[in-house]
Image: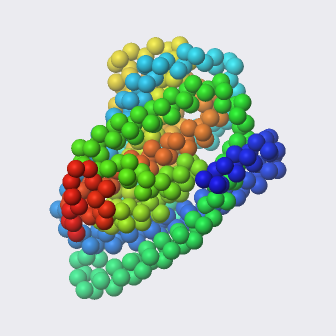
Amino acid sequence: MIGLVLGIGLGVVFYKHTTAITAMNNIGTMFIDLIEMIMIPIVISCLTVGIASMGNVKKLGRVGIKTLVYFEVITTIAIILGLLIANIFHPGTFVDLKSLQAGDISAYVKSAKSYNSGGGIWGTVMDMVPTNIFSSLSTGDIMPIILFCILFGFGTASLGEKGQIIIDFLNAVSQVMFKITNWIMHLAPIGVCALIGATIAKMGISALLPLGYFIGLCYLGFFIFVVIILGATARIYKINLFYLLKYIKNELLLGFSTGSSEAVMPQLMERLTNYGADRSIVSLVIPTGYSFNLDGAALYESLAALFLAQAYNINLSITQQITLVLVLMLTSKGTAGVAGACFVVLLATMSTIGIPASGLAFIAGIDRIVDMARCVVNITGNSLATIVIAKSEGEFAPDDEKALVGGTVVTGR
């Protein structure tokens, strides 16, 4: 919180100061890079050990299907909620595109072309099978790494006592990585201060005013989704959502400040394990969720698409909006590691319903502000998903009864 407040102050002081912005950007980027440096080793060690400990193909299949079905249902609800908000409040009708300053989206266009040339959703499915695991490790492609870890985990389990050596080694690796994570987190106030400062100094408060209504609706949508949709889901499974949010408040604040869900992954996995979810469930659900369960991104993509349609005076029919939902259900998946994933998905989607892709340039400038809240929703959604799946498997054993609603602690491990 201190870093957040100081960052805002520095941003105001160094508004449009190029040298200061560059320095703060570099410091913030180094902080994010430090966290991402340990993300892959943690995923490999934790997921492999988790699968090896699970040691049951039938159980893995059951957990995997539950997870993917849950992800699809929740993200679809998020997409529909975004459309509902846009249809009710009509944010695009209050904006004159001629008065807005267009941002640079060339990098997103390049990523979108790469995504589409790779076969879109089918390309994503094909890319899940790594031809060279070391190439996937070097580029940080999370889905091929997950598939490899699942196979490696089962291979390790099949060795019996011989495989225990590998399990012990990877357990030690994960403990070392979590220790390094704790060290890096001591630098969080500096990293957060730099990232927030650079954002405010570059944009200024005045840049937010023309699109303030749209930004406000995005935040309203995120709030409704967390409180009502995720709240109802938690209630169904007798999970105390607000106690969970309190438990991971530091991770949520870090995600909000950095605008990076990936930056929180190592620390979040450790926190959810300590919260009571079985490590094997955490190790499978969290990394997979970063590709298939980005609830905040799904809500924003549908809201932004309809916002731009309204701004261009394009009246989308019910059929076109249903088409938008169906397309986003596919294109919003498997974009982990893609630069500017939200914009890439929008670029790949908007042409299917006749919205000019060039309109994205008008909201590119405020994406950093929206992304901060978007990350909080993504983190919350994946955290709840982990607890839901763990509880459904009898693998959730919290130390505190406050973690549950109307029930007692059940030790399933």
Q: Return the x and y of residue 408 as percentages of the image width and height.
A: 21, 58
At 24% from the left edge and 56% from the top edge, which residue is drawn?
391
Q: Percent from the top left, x then y, of residue 342?
A: 51, 40
Q: Does residue 284 appear anywhere in the picture?
A: yes
Percent of width and height locating residue 281 = 30, 62
Question: Is residue 69 visible in this depiction of the protein?
Answer: no
Indicate left or right for 287 with 93 as reference: left
| On screen, residue 50 above or below 163 | above
- The colour scheme used to paint the residues is rainbow
Q: Is residue 264 left or right of residue 15?
A: left
Q: So how many labels did they put on this image?
A: 0
Question: Which x, y percent locates residue 380?
Answer: 41, 48
Residue 104 in the figure: left or right of residue 230: right
Near-viewer residue (285 or 209): 209
The structure residue drawn at horizontal position 69% and vertical position 50%, both measured from the top left corner, is 7
Name the residue furthest left: 58
Q: Residue at x 36, y 82 (%)?
A: 168
Residue at 53% in and 64% down: 138
Quick check: 195 left or right of 142?
A: right
Quarter of the image where one finds residue 97? top right
Q: Nearer the viewer, residue 347 or 127?
A: 347
